[in-house]
Image (cartoon, rainbow, N blue to C red):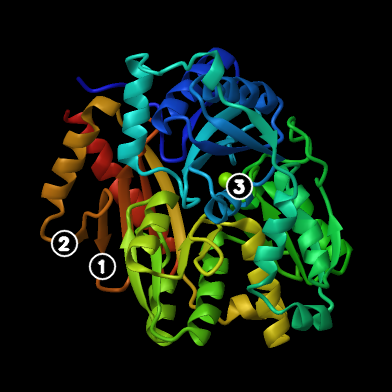
Amino acid sequence: METRRLFGTNGVRGVANVDMTPQFAMELGASIGTFFDGGKLLVARDGRTSSVMLLEATMSGLMQTGCNVFDIGMAPTPALQYITGSSDVDGAVMITASHNPPEYNGIKVIDKDGIELEREKEVEIERIYATKGWKPRDWKSLGTRTSRCGALDEYKEAIKRHVSKERIHSASLKVVVDPGNGVGALVTPYLLRELGCKVYTINANVDGEFPGRLPEPAIGNLAMLCAAVKAFGADLGVAHDGDADRAIFVDETGTAHWGDRSVALTEKFFLLENKGETIVTPVSSSTAIEEIAEAYGGKVVWTPVGSINVSRTMQRIGAKFGGEENGGIFYGPHIAVRDGAMAASLIVDIMSKTGKPLSTLFSELPRHYSSKSKVACPNAVKDTVLEKLRQETEKLKVETLDGVKIRFEDGSWILIRPSGTEPIFRLFAEAKTNEKASALVEEYSQIVSRIVKSN
Ligand code: MG
């Protein structure tokens, strides 16, 4: 019998006290604790209004099943991941809903190497949960809870080892940091200041109501940061999502650049110093990633969409650099997970190394335009629709690593894939002009709609 899926592409997510109740968190905690068989686990949380409630309940479940819990408190997800990978523990649990709106929360399980659990291990936890198969211990062998102090300082020091503090200091860059009222506020402003930048902040009070802007650092949510960069005469701005594993950058003219640009920029400078290295990125990433790899002597390995696929592939093949178009930079010499504070440090390092304004650095990258859309499709027919789409497009140059990616002669492409969480197909196209990208999305939206209707 197949058990109900709890874990999505980024852990278990839902609305606080609707899906994510303390009762659910405690039972899931007990299932996670049983999976780890009473091991040592780190925990942390973001600053959402429901995070304390859910963390306490999750910890009860973990201790009920014999796990010794070490609490690092409020922290960015990548800080917990780094500390997990560098400590003698069996894994970790993070309470966060990342970039989701304020009413959401989530539980993410991390393996002992600091990377999210592989799918097969999540399935095992789902099975324990569905069968109520958790194993409470007797009173003498319950788990304990200990505060784990100093984690954020250790995390900052670890990041500093990968950039030149002297060089950054002498560049005296002015930076505006916008953590969006998320837990990035606890690290990035201090880290950049310790590296020698002059730091200004907006939305840097951790607040679970997210009064400054929504936790997703989408370009449309960053007007305040763009204005602040200009008002302060700053050299750059950096925005994080709610748990600070992503970073989006604003140049000195007040223009925000989507994550595919900052990934391409860091990739270029990584390859300049690491000839022949492999770049790991999902099929949704820009052609610019490929063009830079060709130009600077690297090669690209494509993965299905999802940060865990990038992390696990990097780990499997020993790659040191990965990137996602949403602003996720995976810097292997630090840890093979996306990390917003590491990304910000790499960007200021590149700026200090070149002495060039950020707008110039971005303008020197290959330019492509993207367009996206979605088409409604009931979950039950997604597989059939995808199969028919594959049949209809088999004469074209198609890749099927994740959904259907069609590449055209002129270098443009479109990716069509079923959403893992919503009853929709997502369409994402890239081309040399905006018009061409929009036209591709329009054309294939109609094709997908027609196939959906015929089912
Ligand atoms: Mg996140």
Query: Which residue is at 55% across, 60% downward?
Result: 259
Q: Nearer the viewer, residue 406 or 163?
A: 163
Marks 1 and 2, Cα distance to the nearest angstrom? 8 Å
- Quick one: label 3, few (<14), some, or many (20+) residues within 10 Å? many
| Residue 440 image offset from top left, x and y in percent | 34, 56
Q: Secondary structure at mark 2?
A: loop
In terms of secondary structure, where does tag 1 sit? loop
Residue 424 seen in render = no
Going by the numbered disc 3, the residue's amino acid type is Leu
Q: Residue at x 48, y 78 (%)?
A: 366
Report which residue position mark 2 lands on: 396
Q: Secondary structure at mark 3?
A: helix
For the N terminus, give its image quadrant: top left
Q: Quadrant of the C terminus?
A: top left
In the picture provided, is 67 more to the left or to the right than 253?
Answer: left
Residue underneath mark 3: 80
Q: Earlier in the sequence, mark 1 or mark 2?
A: 2
Provide residue 92's location: percent of width, then percent of height.
53, 40
Amino acid type assigned to the residue bearing label 2 in the image? Leu
Mark 3–mark 2 CB contact (< 8 Å): no
